[in-house]
Image (cartoon, grey):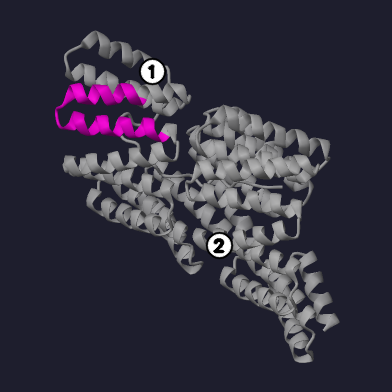
Amino acid sequence: MASAFTKGQQCIDSGQFHRAVGHLTQAADLARELGHRKAERKAHAILGLNCRLIGQHQKSIVHLEKRLAISLELKDRTDQMEACEGLGNIHQSMGQFEKAIEYLQKCLAIALELQNREKEGTIYSDLGAVRLSMGHHEKAIEHLHKSLAIALKVKDGHGRCRAYGNLGAAYLSMEQHDKAIVYLEKELEIALELKNRRGQGAAYLNLGTAHNSMGHYKKAVVYLKTALQVMIEVEHPAGQAVAYGNLGIAHNSAGQYEKALVYHKKHLAIALELKDRHGQSCAYENLGISYDSMEQYEKAILYHKKVFAIASERKDRAGQGRACGNLGTAYASMGQHEKAAVYHSKHLAIAVKVKDRAGQGCAYGNLGIAYRAMGQHEKAIVCHKKNLTIAVEVKDRAGQGQTYGNLGNVYESMGQCEKALVYYKKGLSIALQVKDRGSVGRAYGNLSGIYQSMGQHEKASEYVQKQSAIVNGPSHTVLDSRWVHMQYSS
């Protein structure tokens, strides 16, 4: 039994995760036969983590549930807490958010009972991440601030670093870029103080992602290349993969599509080597979006179908929904609006089932665009108003602005120019507030077009000049293909 444990650990240490499974399974079987419950529990604990690393999420759950069952039998509250945390994290990875919250709250209750402040802080951080994935931004921020307060109180440097990073990611997802940068710079400052190179790499990655979202592409690339150098230095292939993926996103955002493809393919190569199915899915998704940007829609569809296949294999409902949304976007770009509506409806159904409010908003917005393209204006208005309600609920200011623009598009298509003008102005006002350059450019384009239709040519010319000062995409539709920025935690 000891020999099997040793061989399994040696395989993990050398990165041979698949080989480790065989040795550790043998150790667990031998421990069970000999009645060594603690040794069996240890084997299942290591197997649970190892299977998650290689993307075998269902097997990971089986092992972690066995670990939890043995801990309950042994009345070991500390290990019950650890097992519940592991199960919460794996269910989050699979997009099973309600189940994740259930286990994390069990873990939190035990941490409070044992007065384990560091674990309490970690779990608030985990709960914040789950709520963020569900689009529950206020609740996420509340949990993450609790995590930070505990880390400050117990003087946990690594906990502070993690909390600042997660708060930065939360504010970034809410399009509050300036606030996000403040927290992410604090994350980097602490990582430098602690001389934590992996933590520094994570901070550089997150800052790169933030600056890319703000349209600061050159600055984003500098941060991401620094992150890549750190991850290579510390021999962390998973971190390198994330850096390559986000570099691809930055180059695509800057319109450098060929460079973007090179980086996404490097990300994919590492994910395939590591047999990391989640990483492979992210790389395929970003490759699909890049090909969509290059108007190579057939290729884009092939990659999005690969994403759907992996999500189905992993029982990742949120991933299936996202793939359906991106497939809908690709078909819409090809002018196949009925097919697009089918996929966006599938995305909506899944988002409702997993209680992903942000995903529901995205699906409603894209359905609204599809219905407008098919001339079903009343249906389009209903969808955009539902999207607006969700954007207000989750405090997504950029999303509110984009939805006002899309409502303006519908009313313009109906010939209701005055009503369209009101919505375009609302969209522009918000885009300027949140410093969303792409949406500002689209709003200027929309206002130019509507004033031209109303015969106000001087006004139209004014907005044409304003639009020409901003690099932006199409002026009329916002097809929300969501990039997979891979947030990295130290």
Q: Is residue 378 above or below residue 446?
A: below
Residue appearing at x 46%, y 57% in the figure = 319
For the record, the magenta segment spans 399-427
Give the image location of residue 466, x and y in percent: 37, 15
The amino acid sitting under disc 2 is: Glu
Residue appearing at x 31%, y 31% in the figure = 404
Most extreme residue toward the left is 415
Give the image location of residue 441, x and y in percent: 39, 24
Q: Nearer the viewer, residue 219 or 136?
A: 136
- Which residue in the structure is indicated by mark 2? 102
Write down the quadrant of residue 414 in the picture. Answer: top left
Q: Is residue 406 magenta?
A: yes
What whole-number distance in Å separates the C-alpha atoms at marks 1 and 2? 51 Å
Q: Is residue 272 left or right of residue 40?
A: left
Camera sees residue 329: yes
Sequence order check: which comes first, mark 1 or mark 2? 2
Q: Badges 1 and 2: C-beta atoms under 8 Å apart?
A: no
Give the image location of residue 146, x and y in percent: 65, 43
